[in-house]
């Protein structure tokens, strides 16, 4: 989940979702990125680090040791009040009212047609208090939809994005690094923390939320804290990470990491015209919950039987299909059958991988199709997602 990831087809390896933004925005960690020699890219009006050294080095560090990411451009929206759970059950596709305290849940914000406005992670931080984390590029859409849907509920919807920083430590050494960060006092057993659960902590007296979540396919933690304390915590994590080969990592490596893990990216695999079932997210839509929700009728009807579905593709060689490349049934077919939504030469696996939408007749496992890679039809095989799974 995040529109914070780069587009492999762009020359900067990052989408410029709002390149014409009138005012550039900067992370509270911007000074640290400049000092570390980061290259920056515009995303949704934010200047964010796309890389520090090289995309490959940062990608491999996350898979083998650990990477440190700044995700402070993400949107954090607080939902609180006596009817907070009931409201989120109505506003989102999942049933949020039943999750445990300090549990996180992935969900979808749908429109009335069943299309995806955004994919979200929601944390239950109190009995009547939830933190909704939306994609950076969808900040306004998510906030507007939640605010409008809250009108008939006894809840407050508060945008906390500008006051919140988000730092992620991802990789096999993430646990050791976070545990040894000076000044960070954790309320509970971080080692025993389950995936998609969170703990409270303090850093130099400042409240912190630490969640065992991420967007890389590796073990790791995402740390939410007030923006004013972010730079000091970042520096402390860098120091703690020295014996564990921690490296700062940009959004370009984050994209290849999430692609290998088969995680969808909003604007690529997910759009307002995409049904969750097409993207393999039908399970996220809880049609069994007792409450009505926006998009329910359309979700019950579902996409047509011939609607394209998301698949994984693997190829031989080194020439990777990229987002927007067309897919054909054969080498001599004249009509494209589908399109790649995300693709790259996998740094971990060493061969080209891609996610694409194909008609059901071509979406069966082991089906051979052909990607138009700059005028050459390159064979590819349909496989199940994800491409990569970490060893437990």
Image (tube, grey):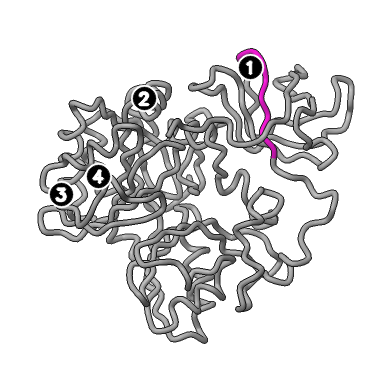
Measure the alpha-carbon separation of dots 2 and 1: 25 Å
Residue 364: x and y in percent read 78, 36
Q: Secondary structure at mark 3?
A: strand
Q: Residue at x 26, y 29 (%)?
A: 246
Read off the magenta span: 311-319
Crowding at dot 2, Cα within 10 Å, few <14 / some 14-19 / many 20+, comes out as some
262 lies left or right of 371: left
Q: Quadrant of residue 47?
A: top left
Between 90 and 113, the one nearer to me in the picture: 90
Measure the alpha-carbon separation of dots 3 and 4: 18 Å
In the rendered image, which residue does mark 3 sit on?
184
In the rendered image, which residue does mark 2 sit on?
64
- Sequence order check, earlier mark of 2 and 1: 2
Q: Quadrant of residue 173?
A: top left
Q: Residue at x 41, y 75 (%)?
A: 157
Q: Nearer the viewer, mark 3 or mark 4?
A: 3
Crowding at dot 1, Cα within 10 Å, few <14 / some 14-19 / many 20+, comes out as some
Between 127 and 92, the one nearer to me in the picture: 127
Q: Secondary structure at mark 1?
A: loop
In the rendered image, which residue does mark 4 sit on?
29
Q: Are marks 1 and 3 in contact (CB under 8 Å)?
A: no
Q: Is residue 109 above or below residue 90?
A: above
Q: Is residue 37 magenta?
A: no
Q: Are marks 1 and 4 in contact (CB under 8 Å)?
A: no
- Sequence order check, earlier mark of 1 and 3: 3
Measure the alpha-carbon separation of dots 2 and 4: 25 Å
In the rendered image, which residue does mark 1 sit on?
319
Q: Secondary structure at mark 4?
A: loop
Q: Is residue 115 above or below residue 12?
A: below
């Amino acid at each position: 989940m995040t529109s914070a990831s780069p587009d492999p087809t762009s020359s900067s390896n990052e989408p410029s979702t709002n390149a014409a933004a009138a005012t550039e925005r900067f992370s509270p960690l911007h000074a640290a990125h400049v000092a570390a020699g980061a290259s920056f890219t515009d995303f949704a009006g934010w200047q964010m680090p796309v890389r520090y050294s090289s995309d490959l080095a940062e990608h491999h560090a996350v898979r083998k040791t650990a990477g440190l990411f700044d995700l402070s451009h993400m949107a954090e929206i607080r939902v609180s009040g006596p009817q907070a759970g009931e409201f989120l059950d109505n506003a989102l596709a999942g049933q949020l009212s039943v999750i445990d305290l300090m549990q996180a849940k992935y969900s979808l914000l749908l429109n009335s047609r069943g299309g995806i406005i955004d994919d979200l992670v929601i944390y239950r931080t109190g009995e009547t208090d939830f933190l909704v984390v939306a994609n950076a590029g969808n900040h306004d859409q998510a906030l507007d939809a939640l605010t409008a849907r809250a009108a008939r509920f006894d809840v407050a919807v508060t945008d906390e994005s500008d006051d919140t920083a988000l730092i992620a430590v991802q990789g096999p050494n993430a646990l050791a690094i976070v545990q040894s960060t000076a000044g960070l006092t954790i309320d509970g057993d971080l080692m025993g923390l389950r995936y998609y659960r969170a703990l409270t902590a303090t850093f130099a007296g400042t409240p912190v939320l630490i969640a065992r979540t991420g967007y890389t396919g590796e073990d790791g933690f995402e740390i939410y804290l007030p923006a004013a304390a972010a730079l000091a915590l970042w520096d402390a994590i860098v120091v703690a990470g020295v014996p564990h080969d921690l490296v700062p990592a940009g959004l370009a490596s984050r994209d290849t990491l999430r692609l290998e893990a088969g995680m969808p990216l909003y604007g690529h695999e997910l759009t307002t015209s995409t049904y969750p079932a097409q993207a393999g997210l039908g399970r996220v839509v809880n049609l069994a919950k007792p409450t009505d929700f926006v998009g329910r009728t359309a979700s019950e009807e579902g996409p047509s039987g011939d609607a394209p579905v998301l698949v994984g593709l693997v190829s031989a060689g080194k020439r990777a299909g990229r987002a927007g490349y067309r897919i054909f049934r054969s080498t001599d077919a004249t009509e494209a059958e589908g399109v790649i939504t995300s693709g790259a030469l996998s740094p971990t696996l060493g061969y080209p991988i891609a996610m694409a939408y194909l008609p059901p007749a071509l979406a069966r496992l082991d089906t051979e199709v052909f990607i138009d890679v700059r005028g050459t039809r390159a064979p590819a095989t349909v496989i199940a997602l994800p491409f990569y799974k970490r060893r437990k």
